[in-house]
Amino acid sequence: MAAFARACALDDVPDGTARAVVIDGTEVAIVRSGDEVFAIRDECSHAAIPLSEGDVEGAEIECWLHGSRFDLRTGKAINLPATEPVPVFPCTADGADILVDVSNPTTDYS
């Protein structure tokens, strides 16, 4: 059963940016790209750097330190040096709020 919790206000995440939040002890980067919102673990799998400090382009986020890119829909590492995926979480905009279910991370990284 989904356990969605409020992450932040939709207006707190301008288009093309990410915001760090903590939900039930889990560090999450909330990302907004156009009309879409995403939730991904806020840690690069290569160097433990907050992804929320990286650049957003479409449905991808780039770690600022070494340039690893991750697919925001699947968490899959798109380029080196990262080779391991990053968990993504179900996320939705509900009125003025962004809701995330950190109890149900994606395990299908295809």
Image (cartoon, grey):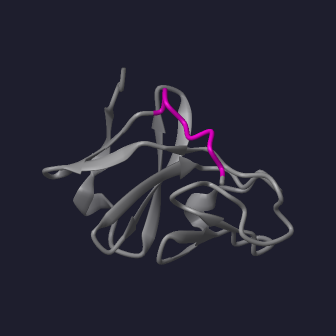
In the figure, 41 relative to 54: above or below? above
Q: Quadrant of residue 44?
A: bottom right
Question: Is residue 19 found left or right of 49 in the rendered image?
Answer: left
In the figure, 107 relative to 78: above or below? above
In the figure, 4 relative to 55: above or below? above
Question: Is residue 105 found left or right of 33 in the rendered image?
Answer: right
Question: Picture coordinates of residue 57 (x, y %)?
Answer: 51, 79
Reply yes or no: does residue 82 show up in magenta: no
Q: Chief secondary structure of the magenta span? A: loop
Residue at figure coordinates x 41%, y 34% from the top left: 101
- The residue stretch that appears in magenta: 102-109
Total label count?
A: 0
Residue at figure coordinates x 25%, y 57% from the top left: 10
Question: Is residue 3 found left or right of 62 in the rendered image?
Answer: left
Reply yes or no: does residue 103 show up in magenta: yes
Residue at figure coordinates x 36%, y 20% from the top left: 1
Q: Residue furthest top?
A: 1
Question: Is residue 46 found left or right of 59 in the rendered image?
Answer: right
Q: Residue furthest bottom?
A: 57
Question: Picture coordinates of residue 66 (x, y %)?
Answer: 81, 72
- The quarter of the rendered structure image containing the C terminus is bottom right
Q: Residue furthest right?
A: 81
Q: Quadrant of residue 63?
A: bottom right
Question: Picture coordinates of residue 33 (x, y %)?
Answer: 38, 72
- Judging depth in this view, the residue of 76 and 99 nearest the camera is 76
Q: Quadrant of residue 2?
A: top left
Q: Residue furthest left?
A: 95
Question: Picture coordinates of residue 67 (x, y %)?
Answer: 75, 75
